[in-house]
Image (cartoon, grey):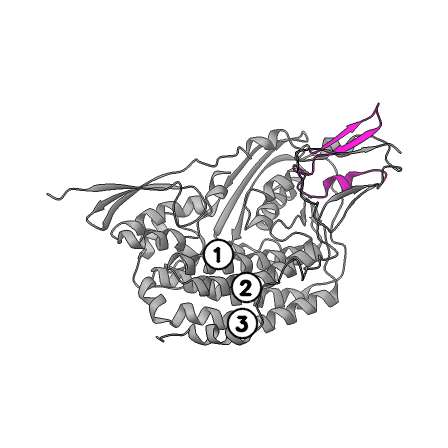
Amino acid sequence: MSEYTVVPFGPQHPVLPEPIHLDLVLDDEKVVEAIPRIGFVHRGLEKLVEKKDFLDFVYVAERICGICSFIHGLSYCIAVEEIMKIDVPPRAQYLRTIWSELSRIHSHLLWLGLFADAFGFESLFMNCWKLREQILDIIEETTGGRVIFGSAKVGGVRKDISREKLSEIVAKLEAYRKEIKGITDIFMRDASVKHRLVGVGVLSKEDAYKLGAVGPTARGSGLAVDMRRLGYAAYGKINFQPVVENAGDSYSRCKVRIRELFQSVDIIKQCAAQIEEGPIEVKVTGLPQGEFFCRTEQPRGEVVYYAKADGTKFLKRLRVRTPTFANLAAMLKMLQGCQLADVPVLILTIDPCISCSER
Amino acid sequence: MSFFSMAKTVLLSLFRKPSTRRYPFVVRPFFKNTRGKVDIEIIKCIFCGICQKKCPTSAINVFKVEKKWEIDRLRCISCGLCVESCPKKCLSLNNQYPASMTERAKEVFPDA
């Protein structure tokens, strides 16, 4: 009978500056099982909903995550708007879609950089982040914040993008496509990168389905789940198909995200072509009463917002299920049977956002 | 499958200008929309205290009797809610970040 070794991994570890603890049960260098522990950065933001005005809580919701901040704010707004039966003007819907996609591009580029860093490719990491900086500039110019947009609002959006600015952004992104292609081709073709990714951490389609994987993790395993297909914001009027790869390994999860970068540019282009003039917000009157369950697609996967209101200016309950939390089970499955040296890469393939999953 | 696919990018960057700025000499201009620090035109302020109530991080204190408005720059997250809710429109968001501090002090604006 072989003897197992338990290696504690985290909460301070070399993969990402976020605290997650894993007890890695090893048989020689092979991981037999991984036992997770989370809860190091719990902030109690859901409880705060009982003390903050429901209109002002958008600011708190946006700060649940530092990367997909806009979509958190947006999901909260959608939940409240649905409870209060507010019709958001079409222009605001398109602007929300554009900002969601910009945040997806910047999040995926951030992830590509971190991923390159995890398998020790420093110059690739720097180049990815160099590209991301240009997206952050567009975001800052249009919303005022680099990662915390602050532009979502119950009943619409806070800022408008002029027609000239919009065509300028589209032109910039079109030119940018070539630059992204140059960098992402390295991920897709380079022998040393492929050596670390192909066939590592395979998650079968059945496992992905049974374990409830979401977002690029599920799509990399061949499941065509994309909450944008539900048609929230202006996604209903946009023509796109979920990006799906079938291999289920680290390489295909990376490929899904890379293809999504180009898809996002396409979506922004379509939005810019379809957007119509009009008001960007409606006045919100009255107090919410009722409940709503909202599902939106973040760069990391599906986020679920459940809001319950009882007719006062404070919501009674807000529940957020973030994509990382849903993907943790799938990640543990991937870790089984992998080498100890592959653990950091595999943890990164689900694009973990631990502070987000603990709120 | 290709080998040394990064080599081209790396070699080209030897002949390019650096992508980073030489900071103290080249300063990145802020955009018009950038949310920097909160400014107050204290003459217009009526010390109603709405900004204090609205502030998500409780960074603002308003003293109605003493006619004093103070802000803790270290707590302020530049969200702009106070600017939006100010009835007299005396608050505004500057596009410059606040300067570094040497001590944890609040910035006090006494009534002029």
Mark 2, other Cα within 10 Å: few <14 / some 14–19 / many ≥20: some
Q: Secondary structure at mark 1?
A: loop
How far apart, in angstroms, are the residues tagged by discs 2 and 3?
Answer: 10 Å
**Chain at tag 2:** A
**Marks 3 & 1 on one chain:** yes
Give the residues drawn in magenta, as a range: B59-88
Observer-nearest of A177 and B36: B36
Q: Is residue A306 left or right of residue B51?
A: left
Residue at image mark 3: A179
| Sequence-first tag of 2 and 1 | 2
Residue shown at 33% from the left, 60% from the top = A249
Residue shown at 75% from the left, 56% from the top = B32
**Is the residue A135 above or below the residue A26 in the image?**
below
Q: Amino acid at mark 1?
A: Asp
What label does residue A130 carry, if any? 2
Q: x, y (%) of residue A158?
A: 72, 50
Observer-nearest of A334 and A67: A67
